[in-house]
Image (spheres, grey):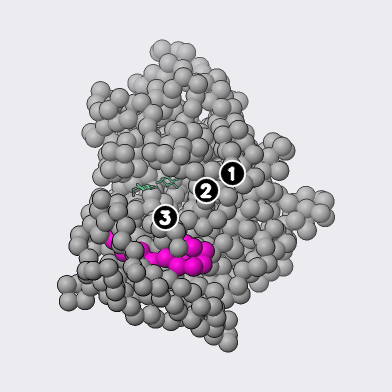
């Protein structure tokens, strides 16, 4: 309350009364609490409307979180593991802070995710764990066979985090039924933690589903999940040695994203990747691994750390020059920001989640400085001069006058990004995915669940920063496990099991076999090859559900198309290949092929087999 009062006083006093140094010149006409509360309520309703059973989620499995009700340009009527988990993280936090009606949504999330974990898909199946990296499913919980950037390895970690937060609440309660529930939820969490411990060091697609490599966002959320997962598992009396052994390796690896000036969003990328690496990926990664009890720690990239502040400044500045709607902004104004400068998706625009993320990260940093000195160094001075032009190097302790001015300027800057976002929120308060870089009009998917969830977490962060209200839960960033790195590229293989007590069907095959189909077929640029067959894994001979091949190893001498598919053991499948032409026409092979999938290795591990085929007919 005190800070709120100070802020209000500062805003109301043009001469700034007792303030020794001139405040930041930016004037916020409306610090906006009432606007924010209105939009917050719209956002919570916006989230609920998009969950199966909600008013904009017709045909969606009850409790499944739709990305957006938009069915064309773009079609977002799927459930993404990432979007759903980030949304659920917000819902769980709100539940813990007293919104008891959210419990039902949380329990439906547990049971639908338990089911989804068992749905085999183009990334793989549960038995090998590989299927957990699938980014999205149809909203009726069936597999999506279409071409996509997969796997995406942030999903299991984010889901674990949402469920761990809920489980800690269950365990803290005195009701033993809640403890039983925590044990059931653990079975879902455990699959995700094993996945992280096994695959964290393998490349995958980033959160924007475009870049194959290592993604800061994914690595940061994976590290968080293992640290808090180990702590929760211990409370439940589980063996957590795998998570404890990998978390330090991941902390070491996380450091490789820092280039001395900003966080590189993507590393270990493929040849041809050509971006600066400045990307909302890192800002969102910092937000998602914020720990209210942490110090301004560089190694876990906490919001108030030097690294995060330098990165934030670099990130904001990129968008000043490139968007028309920012062209009148001065060097100290807030601007609309997007994913990354080189973005071309829908022509590359500012996004609601990213512009709100700047505010959220600043509110979190402000809260951390309640217990930590602000240390302005030559590295962070440019950041500080952006929020507070007269800032100088030095150490500012909590409670000092100048510290309060710096903190007020931080909140002021955060508010300016919220106000900037409000300029582009249409009448009625709906939040789409993007707004036009040219004129600010909403673009791409309407009513994006993630946009609403992002507004809600920003609002909660602001309340916590200003009122010293309840904050998000600590994940253990200050704990010993999260502070010591060991630099080995380890991986631990575990056993994945359907979380039957949490709602999963017990029908998944205990093991699968990884089949590589090598097809020798000459194609021309723009012509693509697909595989389909007589089982649901192979798309039931439906052209739309055929599996895309890759031509990465294709050469003129060796026209190789590759298909990698995980199939249940000991079944004979029928299949054919087909070509999709640049004009969208389809040429289906006239031959019907058959292949007997071998049984699984005796030790239950993932078996494999290689099939060599040659395109037969028609033609080519
Ligand atoms: C859809 C993805 O969701 C989006 O992030 C991406 O930019 C486009 N596909 C283009 O690859
Ligand atoms: C595209 C975004 O790039 C991706 O991050 C998101 O998961 C999907 N849209 C669904 O909202």
Residue in view at x 38 percent, y 36 percent: 444
Q: Quadrant of the C terminus?
A: bottom left
The residue indicated by pointer 3 is 544
Q: CA distance from mark 2 to mark 1?
A: 9 Å
Q: CA distance from mark 3 to mark 1?
A: 20 Å
Can residue 251 be seen? Answer: no
User: Percent position (x, y) of residue 114?
Assistant: 64, 58
How many numbered callouts?
A: 3
Looking at the rendered structure, the secondary structure element under dot 2 is: strand
The span picked out in magenta is 528-540
Residue ID for mark 1:
60
Binning the other alpha carbons within 10 Å of mark 1 as few (below 14), some (14 to 19) or many (20 upward) gives many
Q: Quadrant of residue 267?
A: bottom left
Q: Position of residue 573 (x, y in %)?
A: 49, 74
x and y percent of residue 540 in the render? Answer: 49, 63
- Magenta residue check for 471: no
Q: Is residue 558 left or right of residue 145?
A: left
Reading the image, the residue beneath label 2 is: 79
Is 98 left, or right, of 52 in this rendering? right
């Amino acid at each position: 309350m005190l800070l709120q009062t100070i802020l209000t006083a500062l805003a109301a006093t043009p001469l700034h009364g007792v303030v020794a140094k001139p405040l930041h010149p930016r004037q916020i006409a409306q610090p906006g609490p009432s606007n924010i509360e209105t939009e917050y309520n719209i956002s919570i309703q916006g989230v609920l409307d998009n969950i199966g059973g909600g008013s904009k989620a017709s045909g969606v499995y009850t409790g499944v979180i739709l990305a957006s009700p938009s069915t064309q340009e773009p079609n977002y009527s799927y459930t993404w593991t990432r979007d759903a988990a980030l949304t659920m993280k917000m819902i769980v936090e709100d539940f813990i802070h007293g919104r008891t009606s959210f419990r039902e949504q949380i329990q439906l999330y547990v049971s639908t995710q338990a089911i989804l974990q068992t749905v085999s898909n183009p990334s793989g199946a549960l038995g090998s764990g590989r299927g957990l990296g699938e980014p999205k499913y149809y909203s009726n919980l069936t597999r999506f066979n279409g071409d996509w950037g997969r796997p995406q390895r942030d999903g299991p970690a984010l889901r674990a985090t949402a469920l761990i937060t809920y489980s800690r609440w269950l365990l803290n309660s005195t009701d033993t039924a809640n403890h039983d529930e925590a044990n059931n939820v653990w079975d879902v969490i455990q699959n995700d933690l094993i996945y992280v411990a096994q695959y964290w060091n393998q490349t995958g697609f980033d959160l924007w589903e475009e870049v194959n490599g290592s993604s800061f966002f994914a690595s940061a959320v994976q590290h968080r999940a293992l640290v808090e997962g180990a702590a929760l598992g211990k409370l439940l009396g589980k063996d957590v040695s795998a998570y404890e052994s990998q978390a330090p390796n991941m902390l070491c690896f996380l450091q490789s994203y820092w280039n001395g000036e900003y966080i590189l969003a993507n590393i270990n990328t493929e040849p041809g990747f050509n971006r600066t690496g400045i990307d909302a990926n890192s800002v969102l990664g910092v937000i998602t691994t914020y720990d209210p009890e942490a110090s301004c720690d560089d190694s876990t990239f906490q919001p108030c750390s030097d690294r995060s502040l330098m990165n934030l400044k670099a990130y904001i500045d990129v968008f000043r020059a490139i968007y028309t709607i920012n062209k009148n902004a001065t060097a100290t104004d807030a601007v609309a920001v997007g994913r990354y400068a080189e973005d071309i998706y829908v022509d590359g625009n500012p996004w609601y989640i990213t512009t709100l993320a700047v505010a959220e990260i600043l509110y979190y940093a402000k809260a951390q400085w309640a217990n930590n000195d602000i240390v302005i160094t030559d590295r962070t001075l440019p950041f500080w001069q952006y929020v507070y032009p007269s800032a100088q190097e030095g150490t500012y302790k909590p409670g000092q006058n100048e510290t309060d001015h710096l903190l007020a300027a931080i909140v002021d800057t955060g508010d300016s990004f919220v106000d900037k976002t409000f300029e582009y929120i249409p009448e009625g308060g709906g939040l789409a995915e993007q707004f036009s870089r040219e004129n600010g009009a909403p673009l791409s998917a309407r009513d994006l669940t993630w946009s609403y969830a992002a507004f809600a977490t920003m609002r909660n962060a602001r309340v916590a920063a200003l009122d010293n209200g309840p904050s998000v839960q600590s994940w253990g960033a200050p704990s010993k496990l999260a502070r010591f790195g060991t630099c080995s590229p380890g991986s631990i293989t575990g056993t994945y099991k359907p979380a039957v007590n949490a709602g999963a069907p017990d029908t998944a095959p205990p093991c699968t076999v990884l089949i590589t189909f090598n097809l020798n077929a000459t194609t021309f640029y723009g012509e693509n090859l697909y595989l389909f067959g007589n089982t649901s894994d192979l798309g039931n001979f439906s052209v739309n559900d055929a599996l895309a091949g890759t031509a990465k190893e294709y050469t003129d001498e060796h026209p190789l198309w590759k298909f990698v598919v995980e199939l249940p053991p000991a079944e004979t499948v029928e299949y054919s290949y087909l070509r999709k032409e640049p004009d969208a026409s389809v040429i289906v092979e006239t031959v019907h092929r058959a292949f007997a999938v071998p049984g699984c290795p005796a030790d239950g591990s993932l078996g494999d087999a290689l099939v060599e085929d040659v395109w037969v007919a028609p033609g080519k």
